[in-house]
Each structure stands twice: as structure tokens, then as C-alpha cells.
């Protein structure tokens, strides 16, 4: 029986790197009896099948011209190879159980067995990395508010997106779809030394496409200065001018930080909130300990934490480093 591997994500677990590798080697995939469809891969992010996930989630970015579920079914019906579909946005669309379930059934009707592959990252790193990415996309809430929502609801929500942080509940959701196999892997400690290679091994390719040292590494966390500028622009509706950008650089340089962490108090709260559910996932799927989710592994930033930087006092802290970035400069631009 043919198989369809649906790479569900989650976000910030090297999904984009895996997608670029798969989309760039169609002939090599064919030689191994694998097929990476074209339908559902939008022009603005053509390596992954995001348009399929957007259709399920009714995301504002969905475009029928980029291929919908019907186009995918037609495409994979014309091949006898195993099918690979990948988008981290399936993490969000899986919450729309009825539509996601229909998507799976449409594939199963072709006589294809569906396997859902999901990678999990420790929740502290995941929250930090996801927040910086969302800020680049227009998110304007302080980091502490973002963390509070996760701690209160076990998920982060914005626009049409839902990012789960309680992994046992998310696996239960995936496993509720009939006749599917759920495969769970660790991003923090991948079996093959790389989450991309680990993913390839799950779909039966191992390191057949590229060795470890040549794997693509996409979507790394953006530069802190750029993220701070986006955050201020998101809140004010106006991007920092040259003087303010220089003041931001001076502020960060003075703090002597390149990659701040969430505050220790919040790290402890994250451990307390998710240690039981993480233990259940690790026991069931024989995963290693989620990195940074043990008290002895918690670390304190040398300078301000993410909670300090992306907070209500950020603009005041930045302005304090440079007398040239006052209200008069901003008013002259308006």
C-alpha cells in the first residue's frame, strides 16, 4: 500500500529546511519511489504545501490559484509513488478537525495510508523563537503577555493561527483522525543528529539526498535589532527612523546581549506548566528529555531578558540611550 507522509510541523523545528531539501531534489526523490507534489505550494513560500493548510484553516493567505485539496488529490492520483506533504501550518489547521479530517479521508480514498509526522521543541525555546517570528509578521503584544496566554491556555493564538504548547493534547487530537499513524520526534535531540535527517529517516530516505554538513538551514531566528525595530513599528504604526535605529543598536550593544532568553521566573513557570504532559509524551514515544525544561538547565540572561526588552518600557529604554531620539523627531516625521 502506498503511503502519504504529512509533515505537520510544528513551527520552528526545521520544517522549512526540510521543505527546501525536498523541493530541490525531485529526481532523487523519484529514484527512491517518493513524490513531493506541486499542488498547494504558494508562490511566496513555494517549498512547502502551505496553501493546503491555509485552505483548511481558512487563512487569509489561501489562494485557489496556488492549488487546493482537489488539485492535490488529482496530482497524487496520477503517481504510484509514496507521497510527502509538508507545512508547519498544518499545526494550526489540525485544530479544525472536521476540515482536516476530510483532507485526510480524501487521500485515504486513493488507497493510500496516511502517517502524520510531528516534531516537538522544548516549550521555552519554542516560545522565544516563535515570538520573534510573529513580531516580524506584525505581532505587537509584549513578550510577557504572549507567555501568559500560553501558560493560561496551553496555546498561543493570533489571527487564524493556533500554536499548541501542551503536546500530549495535540497528539491526542492528531490520533483522533481515523486510520492514521502518528509519528513523534524530538527537535532538541534528534535521533539522526539533525531534525531534517531524522525526518528523512522517517520517510525512508535517511541521508540519501544530502549529508549532514550540506543540509539547508533556513528560517533562523532574526537579528535582535531587526526584531526590536519591528516590535516598535508594530506598536506605533511607524517604523523607527535612522536615529532611532541607531539608538536601538546602541541600547542592545550597551546591554551586551545577542540572544536574550525569557526571564528565569517565566522559565520556571513553563517547566511547572508542562513537565507532566512532557513526561507523558516522552514515556509513550520514548523521546529524550526536552531541552531546557528541567530546573538544572534553566539559564539567566547576562543582560535584560526578552520580557524586559519586548515590554511596555522598551521605547523609553531605547530613547534613554540617545538624546536625539525624542518626541520632536517623531513629530517632524508625522
Image (spheres, rainbow, N blue to C red):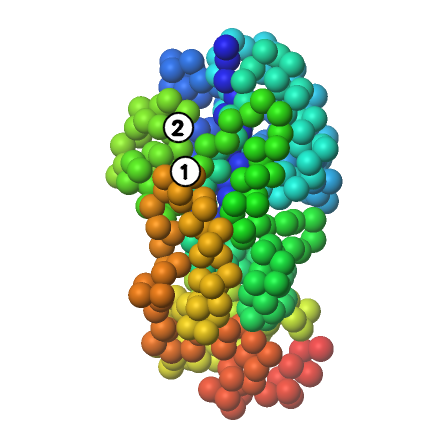
The correct choice, above or below, for 310 with respect to 150 in the image is: below
Q: Which residue is mark 2?
A: 202
Residue 307 in the image, given as x and y percentages of width and height: 50, 73
Q: Quadrant of residue 299?
A: bottom left
SS at circle 1: helix
Residue 149 in the image, given as x and y percentages of width and height: 62, 63
Residue 45 visible to an observer of this rendering: no
Q: Residue at x 59, y 88 (%)?
A: 326
Q: Disc 1 versus disc 2: distance between alpha carbons?
A: 14 Å
- 192 and 333: which is toward the camera: 192
Q: Nearer the viewer, mark 1 or mark 2?
A: 1
Residue 311 in the image, given as x and y percentages of width and height: 56, 76
Q: Assess whether mark 2 and mark 1 are in contact (beta carbons under 8 angstroms).
A: no
Residue 257 in the image, given as x and y percentages of width and height: 37, 73
Residue 144 visible to an observer of this rendering: yes
Q: Residue at x 35, y 50 (%)?
A: 289
The mark nearer the N terminus, 1 or 2, is 2
- Label 1 Cα crowd, 10 Å radius (few <14 / some 14-19 / many 20+): few
Q: Residue at x 72, y 33 (%)?
A: 98
Q: Residue at x 47, y 86 (%)?
A: 321
Using the image, tell me which numbered label, if any, was put on residue 285: 1
Judge from the rendering whether residue 48 lies leftward or rightward of residue 267; answer left or right. Answer: right
Amino acid at each position: 500500500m502506498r503511503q502519504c507522509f504529512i509533515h505537520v510541523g510544528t513551527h520552528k523545528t526545521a520544517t522549512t529546511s526540510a521543505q527546501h531539501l525536498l523541493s530541490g531534489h525531485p529526481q532523487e526523490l523519484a529514484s527512491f519511489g517518493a513524490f513531493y507534489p506541486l499542488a498547494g505550494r504558494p508562490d511566496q513560500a513555494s517549498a512547502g504545501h502551505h496553501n493546503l493548510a491555509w485552505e483548511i484553516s481558512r487563512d487569509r493567505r489561501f489562494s485557489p490559484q496556488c492549488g487546493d485539496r482537489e488539485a492535490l488529490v488529482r496530482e497524487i492520483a496520477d503517481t504510484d509513488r509514496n507521497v510527502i506533504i509538508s507545512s508547519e501550518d498544518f499545526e494550526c489547521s489540525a485544530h479544525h478537525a472536521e476540515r482536516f479530517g476530510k483532507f485526510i479521508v480524501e487521500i485515504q480514498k486513493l488507497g493510500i495510508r496516511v502517517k502524520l509526522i510531528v516534531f516537538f521543541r522544548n516549550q521555552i525555546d519554542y516560545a522565544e523563537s516563535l515570538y520573534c517570528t510573529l513580531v516580524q509578521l506584525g505581532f505587537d503584544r509584549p513578550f510577557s503577555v504572549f507567555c501568559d496566554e500560553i501558560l493560561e491556555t496551553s496555546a498561543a493564538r493570533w489571527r487564524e493561527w493556533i500554536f499548541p504548547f501542551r503536546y500530549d493534547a495535540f497528539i491526542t487530537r492528531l490520533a483522533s483522525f481515523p486510520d492514521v499513524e502518528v509519528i513523534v520526534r524530538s527537535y532538541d535531540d534528534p535521533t539522526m543528529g539533525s531534525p531534517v535527517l531524522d525526518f528523512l529517516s522517517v520517510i525512508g530516505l535517511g541521508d540519501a539526498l544530502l549529508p549532514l554538513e550540506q543540509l539547508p538551514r533556513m528560517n533562523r531566528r532574526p537579528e535582535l535589532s531587526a526584531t526590536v525595530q519591528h516590535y516598535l513599528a508594530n506598536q506605533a504604526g511607524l517604523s523607527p527612523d535612522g536615529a532611532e535605529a541607531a539608538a536601538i543598536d546602541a541600547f542592545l550593544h550597551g546591554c551586551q546581549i545577542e540572544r536574550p532568553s525569557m526571564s528565569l521566573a517565566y522559565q520556571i513557570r513553563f517547566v511547572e506548566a508542562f513537565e507532566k504532559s512532557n513526561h507523558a509524551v516522552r514515556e509513550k514515544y520514548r523521546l529524550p528529555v526536552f531541552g531546557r525544561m528541567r530546573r538544572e538547565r534553566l539559564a539567566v540572561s547576562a543582560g535584560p531578558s526578552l520580557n524586559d526588552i519586548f515590554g511596555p518600557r522598551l521605547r523609553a529604554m531605547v530613547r534613554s540611550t540617545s538624546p536625539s531620539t525624542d518626541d520632536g523627531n517623531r513629530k517632524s516625521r508625522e
